[in-house]
Image (cartoon, rainbow, N blue to C red):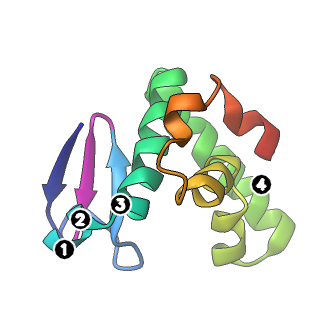
Amino acid sequence: MRIVVNKYLIGRHFVGIALWPFIVVKDSFLKHDEAFINHERIHLRQQAELLVLPFYLVYLLEYIIRLLQYRNSQQAYRNISFEREAYYNEDDLDYLKKRKPWSFIKYL
């Protein structure tokens, strides 16, 4: 896993993103935020499990469904199963060591 600092690859409402096999962050100080990096590492694991491209397709489809459900983009984003798993476990720095494959399913 490589962390890349580039403010142009990320939308203005985000500070970082997991783009297999990289974590891209807007500011270099984020490289030292353990919870943030753990959150993005969880996404990298999810991407690997779904063979990368299907992850992005499922993510987008679930976002659209959540947007129709909540009619609020922020609420839709926070309720995507991949995000729910990552936010819920970002402070547990050992989570990926004990995480079972496809764990995001229980956050649907």
Q: Nearer the viewer, residue 38 or 74?
A: 38
Three-letter amino acid code of the residue under disc 2:
His
Q: Position of residue 27 (x, y in %)?
A: 18, 74
Say what secondary structure mark 1 lies in. helix
**Residue lying at 40% horizontally and 44% vertically, measured from the top left:** 41
Q: Evaluate if marks 1 and 2 touch, with contact meaning CB atoms under 8 Å apart.
A: yes
Q: Earlier in the sequence, mark 3 or mark 4?
A: 3
Disc tally is 4
Rendered-image quadrant of the N terminus: top left
Camera-side mark, 4 or 2: 2
Tell whether 28 sits left or right of 95.
left
Q: Which residue is mark 2?
A: 32
Residue beneath disc 4: 65
Pinpoint residue 49: horizontal percent, then vertical percent.
Answer: 53, 22
Closer to us: 64 or 105: 105
Between marks 4 and 1 in the image, the one whose residue lies nearer the viewer: 1
**Was residue 23 drawn as part of the magenta stretch in this picture?**
yes
Label 1 and label 3: CA atoms lie apart by 11 Å
**Looking at this view, is 23 or 66 the one in front?**
23
Q: CA distance from mark 3 to mark 2?
A: 6 Å
Amino acid type indicated by mark 3: Glu
Where does label 3 land, which residue? Answer: 34
Residue 27 visible from this viewpoint:
no
Within 10 Å of the Cα at label 4, are there few (<14), some (14-19), or many (20+) other Cα atoms?
some
